[in-house]
Image (cartoon, rainbow, N blue to C red):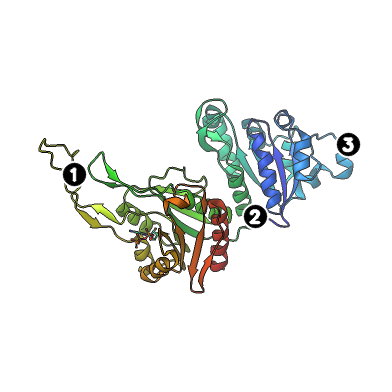
Amino acid sequence: MLAGKRVLLIIGGGIAAYKSLELIRLLQKAGASLVPVLTRAGAQFVTPLSVSALAQHKVYQDLFDLGDEAEMGHIQLSRAADLVVVAPATADLMAKMAGGRAEDLASTLLLATDKRVLVAPAMNVRMWTHPATQRNVATLRGDGVLFVGPNDGEMACGEFGPGRMAEPAEIVAAIAAALGAGLLMGRHVLVTSGPTHEPIDPVRYIANRSSGAQGTALAAALRDLGARVTFVTGPASVPPPAGVDVVRVETAQQMLDAVQAALPADAAVMAAAVADWRVANAGAQKMKKDGSGKAPVLEFAENPDILASVSKGPMRPALVVGFAAETENVVAHATAKRARKGCDWIVANDVSPATGIMGGSENAVTVISDSGAEGWQRMSKDAVARRLAERIAKALQ
Ligand code: CTP
């Protein structure tokens, strides 16, 4: 995805610096060539040796390192890259950037560069929300600096809130986006995921065993290819991926409304396990035993078919992908489902309890399209997601 792209990576100080090692690994995998710079504070958290070994490049640390100046001056160093990335970016480093200071190698490179700069801030919640930091962020944004994160979450310091550095995969996606490199750059993809909950009364509901893992992995893989992803999710047991637009719903009807509101899209991938039925006589109050020993009788009404309504609707995306959860005759049922629902592809899987697929981390799918049924070997849900995302990207080209 980033083959031939040159990234100057500045690693600032902070506990999140350990994640920059994973970032380097992912950038290598994506084909980027890296020149690492480690600040004095950064070197307190990761060693120059681990950085240079992973980056397969000498690590620069000191402005007054004459050897470096003879090899490559700091002006040249700041311009040889296609993009300058600062991860983690500390409050101090951002303050230096906003103030135009050049007092060490990192801040000098950031002042001297003529390339775009992407920063991944990481700091304590209070430091991030402090008016001084927020002023600096506004200044930097005004200067055209790009941001990825920070995310909400539990922090190494024990506090909770915004300040966590974006995940390495998210930073790679932001780098690809900044370089216009992702195959799905500029595309909007809608993904549904998770189960739906259909209320019986205000405290009880009918649900299914979907964890949302496959839909979540797909949304992340599409994001990694540069797509803008709208992620409409039922109450899943895995958290939604960072860096996508999350719309949380409970019922099938709410999911349909959210999906319609998210259109138009270039592609829609409906991985949600939508309940086919809702309780027509759901109670407005908690149902009570009346002492007679008679069980209540639930009446059901059919839910709207979201996939069919998108496939056959006036705002149909160029590519509509459905899933099929089957427990027998997988290919035959899924092939019939594809025709009935009018989608382009169906990703079918056998969700019989013995397969361990529903709620598990692996999937064995058969992709059914115009060109027939193609069985994929069993692999992780992440691997299925990446392969599917690449296929979606190719289909949209
Ligand atoms: N789906 C949907 N809306 C529904 C039911 C299902 O959008 N009300 C979508 C799912 O997101 C999935 C596909 O349709 O992409 C197939 O879902 P599945 O549960 O396998 O099929 P069903 O429609 O329930 O068909 P059947 O009852 O025959 O299994």
Question: Local crowd at mark 2 within 10 Å, few (<14), some, or many (≥20)?
Answer: some
Q: Which is more N-terminal, label 1 or label 2? A: 2
Q: Which of 155 and 196 is in front in this view?
A: 196
Q: Which residue position holds label 1?
A: 283
86 left or right of 165? Answer: right
Q: Which residue position holds label 2?
A: 179
Q: Does residue 244 appear in this view?
A: yes
Q: Does residue 116 appear in this view?
A: no
- Amino acid type at mark 2: Leu
> Which element carries disc 3, helix, strand or loop?
helix
Q: Estimate the spatial distance between the alpha carbons at disc 1 and disc 3, rounded to whole Å.
A: 77 Å
Instruction: Quadrant for residue 180, please give it.
Output: bottom right
Q: Nearer the viewer, residue 288 or 263?
A: 288
Q: Where is residue 186 in the image (x, y as percent from the top left)?
A: 54, 60
Residue 66: numbered disc: 3
Instruction: Quadrant for residue 60, please give it.
Output: top right
Kindly tell me whether mark 3's CB lies below 8 Å from ligand 1: no
Q: Where is residue 268 in the image (x, y as percent from the top left)?
A: 45, 61
Q: In which quarter of the image is the N terminus?
A: bottom right
- Amino acid type at mark 1: Gly
- Amino acid type at mark 3: Leu
> Which element carries disc 2, helix, strand or loop?
loop
